[in-house]
Image (cartoon, grey):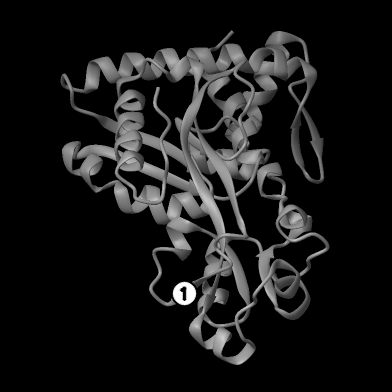
Amino acid sequence: MDAENLRFLLEVARTGRLRDAAARLEVDETTVSRRISRLEQELGVRMFDRTPQGWRVTDSARLILPHAEAVESSVARALEAVVSRPGELSGTARLLAPDGFGANVLVPGLRPLLDAHPGLSLEVITATSHDLITARDFDVAVTLEKPSPRAAAVRHLADYELRAYASRDYLARHGTPGSIDELRRDHDLIWYVEALLDVAPLRILDELLPRGHARLQTNNITGQHSATRAGLGIGILPTYIGGADPELVGVLPEALSISRTYWLVVPRDLTELLRVRIITEAIDALVAEHPHLSVRTR
């Protein structure tokens, strides 16, 4: 079997589309299709079901994928040993994070890491979605859900608080709610589009505000923050966003607060890579220094 075909298997499995896999591999779609067909012929099994929605991995492919990932990791370690000088990183690493943490904590804190390693490039993918983690297309991830430790090394990263915030303009026009009941009954709420929210720890509107309804819903925290600043309603935001914004005022801070956890996730076959170890150390450092994040004593 041509081991090079495993690279094509991995990219099609991760992207679900020939076009996207071809772009990642920097080849044309015909080459990807030919490589997959060759692998299927060599193994005598079908790797993908071709559907209008994309290429879906078969049960046979699921058995092979962990071995293909192990080969990929071995090659990455070999290249790292040959190309990098001792203590110096090179190449590209992909980081995944929820949109709030990624845009407001991770990205602003990357400068020391990049300054220390001029040869390192980073791809930062920010989205509050479960699918990105299950695709296993990352070097280091920060998640809201604690994934199964079967295929990944998982540990606690930090805890954070969600609280209610509003602009001064909104409160001047609508008044400041004096209770949870008043907030739910008399005020406009800003939250996620529940139908698009596939991260269980954030399906909390009913917990925070029983029978509450968000009049304005967006699919990301950036939209919620912008809407809150614009005076469109009262937003439920992480304190590292709402509490750090001088344009916003906390609402019912004693009555409305909920704690959530970020987890640090690394695929098990990548844990020994130098770049992964240094990146996770950098994330630990920026989290430990952040005033709105709480790190547990290990």
Q: Where does residue 188 sit, x and y in percent of width and height?
A: 70, 77
In this picture, residue 288 sits left or right of residue 7: left
Residue 64 vs 210, above or below: the answer is above
Rendered-image quadrant of the C terminus: top left
Q: In this orientation, which residue lies closer to the viewer: 257 or 112?
A: 257
Towards the viewer: 142 or 39: 142
Secondary structure found at label 1:
strand
Q: Residue at x 68, y 72 (%)?
A: 189
On screen, residue 40 above or below 206: above
Q: Where is residue 208 in the image (x, y as percent from the top left)?
A: 70, 56
Q: Residue at image x 64%, y 32%?
A: 134
Quarter the N terminus occupies: top right
In the rendered view, would you say 14 is above or below 197? above
In the rendered image of this protein, does residue 140 appear above or below residue 235?
Answer: above
x and y percentages locating residue 47 in the rendered image:
73, 22
Amino acid found under the numbered disc labelled 1: Leu
In this view of the protein, can residue 265 be seen by the observer?
A: no
The residue that appears at 61% across and 81% down in the rendered structure is: 232
Residue 194 in view (yes/no) = yes
Q: How crowded is mark 1: few (under 14 residues within 10 Å), some or many (20 or more)?
A: many
Whole-percent x, y for residue 10 in the image: 59, 26
Q: In which quarter of the image is residue 114?
A: top left
For image coordinates 31% across by 42% down, the residue present is 286
Question: Outermost residue, bottom direction?
Answer: 173
Q: Name the residue under label 1.
A: 248
Q: Quick check: 47 left or right of 126?
A: right
Going by the image, does 192 lie left or right of 239? right
Q: Quadrant of residue 180?
A: bottom right
> Who is closer to the viewer here, 129 or 46?
129
